[in-house]
Image (tube, rainbow, N blue to C red):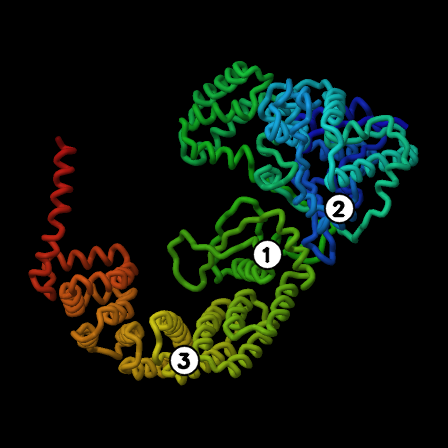
Amino acid sequence: MSHAVFGVRHHGPGSARSLVAALDAYDPDCVLVEGPPDADPLLRFVGDPGLVPPVALLAYAPEEPRTAAFWPFAVFSPEWQAVLWARRRDVEVGFCDLPAAVTLAAQATTLLDDALEEEPEADAAEEGPSAVDVLLGGPAPRGADAAARRRLASRDPLAALAQAGGYDDAERWWEDVVEGRTDSSSPFPLVLEAMGELRRLVGQRQGRRAEGEARREATMRQTIRAAGKRGRERVAVVCGAWHAPVLAEPLGPAAPDARVLRGAVKRKVVCTWVPWTHRRLAASSGYGAGITSPGWYAHLFETPDAPVVRWLTAVAGELRGRDLPVSSASVIEAVRLTETLATLRGRPLAGLAEVTDATRSVLCDGDELALRFVTDRLVVGERLGEVPPAVPTVPLEADLAATTRRLRLKREPAARALDLDLRRGIDRERSQLFHRLRLLELGWAAPATSEVQATGTFRETWRLQWHPELAITVVEAAVWGTTVEAAATAKIDSVVAGQSLVELARTVERCLLAALPEALERLLGACADQAARDADVLHLMEALPALARAARYGDVRGTDTTTLRQTSEVLVRRTCAGLGRATAGLDDDSAVRVRDLVDAVHAAVGLLAQEGADDVRREWLETLLALVGRADLAPLLQGRLTRLLVDAELVADAPDRLHRALSYGSPAAAKAAWVEGFFTDGAVLLVHDPALRGLLDGWVAGLGDAEFVDVLPLVRRTFGTFSPVQRRSLAQRLAHGDPAVAAPAGERFVELAAPALATVEAILEAARG
C-alpha cells in the first residue's frame, strides 16, 4: 500500500481547487479526511441534492446535549470537495481524526484545561538566535519581545511562514500563495516540505494541547494503516497542513501510536448534519478555524473566471439595491484600480484588500457605512445551508421541520420581521408555533414592534432569525416530547409546581397564546388554588392583568376562556376587598409601585368589562371612589385615583380637587406628587380644560425659589410623559392669551422667550448678510 498526504488549509478555495486536481491525478481507491469517524455513516448524504453547504456535522451526548461539537463545511472547504470527489466516483471515503466519542468525553475537563493553559515562557536568557528567529530572517531582540515572538510562531505556524515571506498578515500570504492560484500545478509537495521544516524549527509543543494533538495524529496514522489492511492500494489523506509531515510515508511502527491511544475515555454520542452559515464560518464568530471572508472565498471558488470583475459587479448590484447610484463606468474604473493596486503591491492576483480599497474609493465614494454594508452582505455573507429530511435527527427536529414547511416558514440567518393577522388560519398557526418555541426557550422567533400602523388584538409582529447553534437547543428540548406541541405541554407541566401566583398567571397567558389546551386546564386549576391561598393583595394585583389579557385574547383565537374569566373576576373582587389595607401609610417608593399596579388592574377590569363583566367594573370603581377621599392615602395615589374617576365620569369637580391639593399648607413635594398622579398621560385634560390649566399655572407661578427647585424634577417627569404635539399645544395656549390664564402669565411667557428670540433673529441676520 502507498498513500499520499495533502495538507490543506481548512475552508480555503485555492486548496479545494488544487485538491480536486491532485485527486484526479493520484486516482486513489480510498480517501481519508480529517474529521470524526463516528460520522462515517452520514457521508452517504454528501452529493444528495438536498444537502447544500454550508453545513456542519453535529456530534452531541444524548444524555447531555449541551456537550456537543461542530465540524463545519463550506462548498469551498477542501474536506468537502474530497468527500464529494469520492462519492461521485464511488470510492471509499471516511474520516480519520479522533472520534467524537473521545473528544466529547474530554470536553468538560481536558478541553477546559486547554483553554486556561498558558504557553510556557521562552527562556529570555537563551544565548544566540533560535531556529524560529533564523526562519524569520534574523535574531529577534532578547527578553520579553523575543519570548512573545516565539510563542506567536508556536501558536500560529502559518504566521511564521508569512513573516518569512515578507508578509505581516498570514491570511494575505496564504491567499497569494495558495488561494489566489488559478493554474493546475499542485502546491501540496511544497506545503508538505514547508510544514515539515517549520515543525522541526518550532519543536514539540508542551502541555495538554500537545497531548491532544499527539492523540489526533496517532489516530490518523492508525486509520491509514487500517485502510492498508483492508486491501486499499492508493490512499489519499486530506488533513490540515500542520499535520501533513507526520502522516507522510513512512508511518513507522504502530506500537507507539497504540500506546498513545490506550485508555482513552469515551462516551456515547449521536451525529447528524445541521445547516450552517457563512457568518458562523467567520473568525469573528469565535470559530477557531474561522476565516475572515467566507463570502469572498465562496466567490473565488464558484467563479474562477474573471472573479474580480464579477465581484465588483455584484457589489454594484447590492449598492443599487440600497438606492445608491453606481454606474457601469464606476464598475470599470473600480476594476482598473483593483488591478493597478495589485501590480503596485506585487501580488499575482488582486485580493480582497485591493477589491475593498477600490470599492471604498470608487463605488462608495469613501462612505464607510456603505462599505460596511457590502462587507456584511458579500464579504461575510448570510448563506444558510440545507439538510434533506432523510438525514437522521431527533423526532422533535423532524416535527419542527415538517411544521415549518407546512406553514411556509423558512429558517434564514438574516433577521426579518413577520406581521401576522390572527384572523387568518395560517397566521394563527404560525403564532402558536412561535409561542410554543418560546416556551421551549428556542430563540428563533421573538416578539417585535410592527412598522405597520395597525391596531387590534388580531395583529402580531415577530422577528425571525435562525442561528446554527439552535440545533443544540432543539436536541435539548427533545427530552420533553417528540412534537413541538407535546414538548411545550410537558415543559409547562414540569414548571407548575412551586410557582408563585404571578408566575402562574404569566404562564397561563403564554400557554393560551401557544394553544395548549391540556396544559391550560391544569394551569388554571393550579392558579385558582394558589389564588385561594395567597392573601397578599399586591400579588393578586400583579397576577390579574395577565389573566385578563389571556381571557380577552383567547376570544380572538377561538379559545374557550370561561374558566379564565371567572378566575379573573374572583381576583378583582378579592382585590377590592383588600385594597384599602394595601394602600394605607405607604412611603413614596411603595406608592409608585401601587400606582402602577392600580393602573394595570384598571386596564384589566376594562378588558373584563368588554366581555360582559359590568358588575365587576362597577365594584372596582366604587372601591376607588371610597378610597380617594381618605386622608392617609399618599398624594400620588390620590391624584391617580382622582384621574381614573374623572375618566369614568364619576368625579365632576376635578378643578376643585386640584385647587384643594395645591392649597397653602401642603408641602411642595406632596403637591407635586398629586400633580404627577393626576396628569401622567393626561395632557388632553390640560389642553381642553381651561380651569385646570389656570390652577396649575397659578400654582407653578406662585412657587418660591426653593420650592421650585424641589418640585422641578417631579413636574418635569410628569410633563415628560406628554407627546411633543401635546406640549406644543399647551405652550401655544399659554403664550397666546389663554382665557383661563391671567394675561400677565402670557406676557411673562413672551418676556421670558424674548432673549432667545433676539438671539435667533441675530443669527438669521448674520446668515442673510
- Return the residue at label 1: 442
Q: Amino acid at mark 1?
A: Leu
Q: Residues within 10 Å of mark 2 (few under 14, many from 20)?
A: many
Return the disc, 3 or 2, that comes first in the chain's sequence: 2
Q: Nearer the viewer, residue 274 or 639?
A: 639
Q: Quadrant of residue 168?
A: top right
Q: Quadrant of residue 366?
A: top left
Q: Residue at x 27, y 75 (%)?
A: 642
Mark nearer the viewer, 3 or 2: 2
- Is label 3 in a helix, a strand or a loop? loop
Q: Is residue 140 left or right of residue 353?
A: right
Task: Please give the label number shown on residue 584.
Answer: none
Residue 89 x, y percent position in the rendering:
80, 31
- Return the residue at label 2: 103
Any part of residue 352 in sight? yes
Q: Residues within 10 Å of mark 3 (few under 14, many from 20)?
A: some
Q: In this picture, is 161 found above or below 368?
A: above
Residue 117 x, y percent position in the rendering:
67, 43
- Return the residue at label 3: 613
Return the disc, 2 or 1, that comes first in the chain's sequence: 2
Task: State which quarter of the image contains the C terminus.
Answer: top left
Q: Is residue 316 left or right of residue 675?
A: right
Mark nearer the viewer, 3 or 1: 1
Return the disc, 3 or 1, that comes first in the chain's sequence: 1
Q: Residue at x 47, y 70 (%)?
A: 546
Task: Work out how far the residue at label 3 is from the one at label 2, CA to CA, in angstroms.
Answer: 62 Å
Q: Is residue 304 left or right of residue 328?
A: right
- Is label 1 in a helix, a strand or a loop? loop
Q: Residue at x 46, y 82 (%)?
A: 570
Q: Residues within 10 Å of mark 1 (few under 14, many from 20)?
A: many
Task: State which quarter of the image contains the N terminus.
Answer: top right
CB atoms at circles 2 and 1 under 8 Å apart?
no
